[in-house]
Image (spheres, coloured by chain):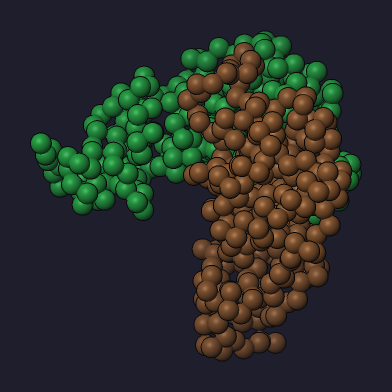
Chain colours: A green, B brown
Amino acid sequence: MNKSISAAQIKRIRSLQQKKFRADTSLFVVEGEKLVAEALHSGYEIESLWKRDEISPAAMARISSLSSPSPVLAVVRQKKILLSDIRLEKGRLYLMLDGVKDPGNLGTIIRLADWFGVSAVFCSPDSVELYNPKTIQATMGAIFRVPVVYCNLADVISKAEAGGIPVFGTFLDGKPLSDDFYSGIEGGGIVVLGSESFGISEDISAIIPKEKHILIPSFDKAGKIREGGHGSESLNVATACAAILSLIRAR
Amino acid sequence: MNKSISAAQIKRIRSLQQKKFRADTSLFVVEGEKLVAEALHSGYEIESLWKRDEISPAAMARISSLSSPSPVLAVVRQKKILLSDIRLEKGRLYLMLDGVKDPGNLGTIIRLADWFGVSAVFCSPDSVELYNPKTIQATMGAIFRVPVVYCNLADVISKAEAGGIPVFGTFLDGKPLSDDFYSGIEGGGIVVLGSESFGISEDISAIIPKEKHILIPSFDKAGKIREGGHGSESLNVATACAAILSLIRAR
């Protein structure tokens, strides 16, 4: 019943924990019963599949990147999605991430995008890599359902403007979300979120119209909007994303 | 100008990275210029303060738990906040966490509580410890502004019911948020969130009225609520918290 795994195969799978080898081979690793099941039912090509019961718990521990190795691990071929593969449509919702660096944040945002029916996530080329094991884990399988495109964000914004699709960005000095925002986005548009440390880059800020610079308002204990001067300067990028998507969808 | 730090002091500060020693001494460690500044301006007692410029970068690296040690570290005395210290008031918003285990999630939720004007956070005794360095870091200073109480959650729910304060809980089989929920919470009430793996415990589920079991709806790409059967089974607890708080406050 046993399937053998060679020392060379173990080494190769372990090497995929490093970005360089993932880039060289265009492969990535998926672990966990739920995630592997989703990979198997997705359009992604499975390069190899390893089960603890077949290769031994010791071998599974060696190929796993998790502290408690799951019973199953798949090596999956990456899919390169291009901007030209995405049709920007009115009435649809899109996210744009400008330099998000934390793999957990990226994965959590993809999971949110899936939950709230976002049609695609655009990432700047300097964003954290999609196939980082921590990103994959945090998506909880949403990576197989939401198209994520690494591309020049300014190109997407030009395309959106040409198509009459509004582009909003979150800024610390933005305008608190109001009816203007909700009627502007009317269930469709692009929401841009910036990096954990620096927010949206200067280049991208400059091409988002000033009146579309938004801010999730902060509230005092009586439920009144706090004007300026709040101790917490910002929200974490993934929780800001959750707030905005839920607010848009609740309309 | 230099201040000396003894080997015994280094050992003692390092020991505070462990829960046992934090519990034994009722101390915790705060790192980072922003967080330490907030600690200094809070009502918390500072037991000792260490600056890299005074004790040397090498000594700072030894007492720090961060991979890139900050220029300043404070040892702070814990504050034990009791349920009797909190006045449950109508029209105020409260959070209740039933068994949240991840320190980053707890810290992120406290940061959200601060942002959205939550009056107190109640944690079940089996929740992750408040003074875990990862929790403190994730609060971004909100720990000094939001009261966090570890207590029997059923006691809080009884008190709330007696005071006419509604208690809502998030459940995977709950009712999608609707006008009923918004009018029920009318800017005030308690929202209960469960653990990452198991949700709200059976004991607490049983005392939350069935009609107050809520769910953040999931949406398809056209913006329609997805009824049942969605690939992603749930949201991360911190992002669910962000969605609910922002939705309540936007009303």
Return the x and y of residue B250 as percentages of the image width and height: 81, 32
What residue lies at 70% left-to-right and 17% top-to-bottom?
A187
Q: In which quarter of the image is residue A167?
A: top right
Return the x and y of residue B246 as percentages of the image width and height: 75, 36
Q: In this view, does B1 lie above or below A39?
A: below
Return the x and y of residue B159 as percentages of the image width and height: 77, 52
Foreground pick, B18 / A238: B18
Residue A151 seen by the camera? no
Is residue A108 toward the left or the right of residue A44 in the image?
Answer: right
Is residue A225 toward the left or the right of residue A160 in the image?
Answer: right
Q: In this view, does B126 lie above or below A86?
A: below
Foreground pick, B159 / B143: B159
Is residue A133 toward the left or the right of residue B23 in the image?
Answer: left
What residue lies at 35% left-to-right and 36% top-to-bottom?
A33
What residue lies at 38% left-to-right and 33% top-to-bottom?
A34
Image quarter (top left, top right, bottom left or bottom right) of the C terminus of chain B: top right
Q: In this view, does B118 lie above or below B71?
A: above
Foreground pick, A65 / B158: B158
What residue lies at 44% left-to-right and 31% top-to-bottom?
A141
Number of callouts:
0
Return the x and y of residue B1 as percentages of the image width and height: 70, 87
Residue B109 seen by the camera? yes
